[in-house]
């Protein structure tokens, strides 16, 4: 049976206990100062590499974009093992959304310049009720929509515009794709995904 | 120098350069419902204070989970803290026209 995916404009405090087939969009998430600080940190981090890649079964690159992974830092020392500004940013996200990732599978930065379209992919298995993907848009004011596809016929079903200070929480089993910006600016986001639990949200 | 003192120093440098009489002055200026001309500036300072302390909490926990043989220098840890944006950032949006001299139309 086909189920409709829904994109919902939401506010912190919304119930995120069920994310299957859902995409939540939160705008104006951080204070201007926190956004500026995390953007400064991200642009200055020495960890950027052209390593966010997806290959097909034949080993051909489907996409290759800029990235910086912090999952190993988490595996070694937990959340405090992250760079402090990233720790502070994610603490704000978890607190405002009332969730915490108990087993993250990826924590990192994604960066796309013109021409660096990401390929269509999924982050987790279908019906994985305890999985969530968080996309935290922090960079320059540019475009590069998040495209969402139907699971069964790969039809484009919806899109979420890139906009700094926007947080997208979604069911990562929905096939999705981040388009590259069409101008010279840098489309930058923090990506966190994995197993999550709900906690009480704080405004 | 310890990291707590460093965090206090980062905050203190902003508060002092913007000519507040300490954090209490910032709090009063930026309080909810404040009509002070500098209310927005003070709120940006308070956001910065939050960011510094949240980063400090993470960093302190990180240091606590690190074997003494693997510890970095205080300077290296200090560099990981959020340094303040330019002072103009805090003051942006101030109605500067209010302080302009009257135009001489004679």
Image (cartoon, grey):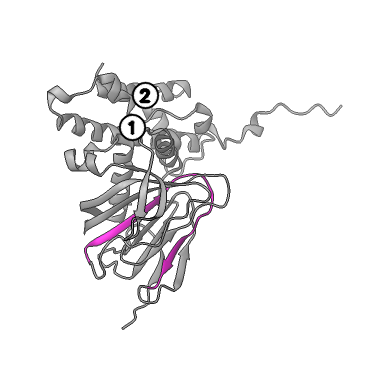
Say which quarter of the image contains residue B94. top right
Query: Of the numbered discs in the image, which one, if any, rests on residue B52?
Result: 1
Q: Chain of mark 2?
A: B
Measure the alpha-carbon separation of dots 2 and 1. Answer: 8 Å
Marks 2 & 1 on one chain: yes
Do the residues under discs 2 and 1 have CB atoms within 8 angstroms? Answer: yes
Can residue A198 be seen at all in this image of the molecule?
A: no
Query: In percent of the image, x 29 and y 66: which residue is there?
Result: A19
Query: In percent of the image, x 28 and y 63: which residue is there?
Result: A16
Residue matched to label 2: B10
**Quadrant including the N terminus of chain A:** bottom left
Q: Say few, some or many: other residues with alpha carbon within 10 Å of mark 1 (under 14 / 14 to 19 / 20 or more).
A: many
Q: Outermost residue toward the front?
A: A58
In-image side of A195 versus A6 (left or right): left
Q: Say few, some or many: other residues with alpha carbon within 10 Å of mark 2 (under 14 / 14 to 19 / 20 or more).
A: some
Residue A161 at what x, y percent from top left?
49, 59
Q: Tag 2's secondary structure?
A: helix
Q: Is residue A139 magenta?
A: yes
Residue A23 at what x, y percent from top left?
37, 65
Q: Tag 1's secondary structure?
A: helix
Look at the picture and state if A69 lies above or below A41.
Answer: below
Q: Earlier in the sequence, mark 2 or mark 1?
A: 2
Residue B78 at what x, y percent from top left?
31, 24
Say which quarter of the image contains residue B22. top left
Query: In percent of the image, x 28 and y 45: which residue is there?
Result: A91
Image: magenta residue range: A129-150
Q: Is residue B12 magenta?
A: no
Residue B40 at what x, y percent from top left?
49, 38
Query: Of the numbered discs in the image, which one, if any, rests on residue B60?
Result: none
Query: In percent of the image, x 51 and y 36: which residue is there?
Result: B36
Q: Which residue is at the front of the view, A11 or A73?
A: A73
């Amino acid at each position: 049976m086909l189920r409709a995916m829904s994109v919902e404009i939401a506010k912190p405090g919304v119930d995120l206990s069920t994310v299957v087939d859902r995409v939540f969009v939160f705008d104006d998430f951080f204070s201007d100062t926190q956004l500026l600080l995390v953007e400064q940190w991200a642009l200055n981090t020495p960890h950027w590499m052209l390593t966010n890649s997806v290959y097909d079964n034949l080993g051909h690159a489907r996409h290759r974009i800029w990235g910086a992974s912090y999952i190993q830092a988490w595996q070694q020392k937990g959340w405090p093992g992250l760079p402090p500004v990233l720790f502070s940013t994610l603490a704000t996200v978890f607190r405002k959304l009332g969730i915490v990732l108990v087993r993250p599978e990826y924590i990192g930065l994604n960066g796309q310049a013109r021409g660096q379209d990401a390929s269509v992919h999924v982050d987790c298995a279908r019906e994985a009720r305890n999985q969530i993907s968080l996309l935290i848009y922090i960079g320059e004011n540019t475009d590069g929509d998040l495209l969402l596809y139907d699971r069964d016929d790969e039809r484009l079903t919806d899109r979420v515009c890139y906009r700094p200070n926007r947080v997208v929480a979604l069911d990562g089993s929905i096939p999705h794709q981040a388009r590259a910006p069409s101008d010279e600016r840098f489309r930058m986001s923090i990506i966190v995904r994995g197993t999550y639990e709900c906690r009480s949200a704080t405004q | 120098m310890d990291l707590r003192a460093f965090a206090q120093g980062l905050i203190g440098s902003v508060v002092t350069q913007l000519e507040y009489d300490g954090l209490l002055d910032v709090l009063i200026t930026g309080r909810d419902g404040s009509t002070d001309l500098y209310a927005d500036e003070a709120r940006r300072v308070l956001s910065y204070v939050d960011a510094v302390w949240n980063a400090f909490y993470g960093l302190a926990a990180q240091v606590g989970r690190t074997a003494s043989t693997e510890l970095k220098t205080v300077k290296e840890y200090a560099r990981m803290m959020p340094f303040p944006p330019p002072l103009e950032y805090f003051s942006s949006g101030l109605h500067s026209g209010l302080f302009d001299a009257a135009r001489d139309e004679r």
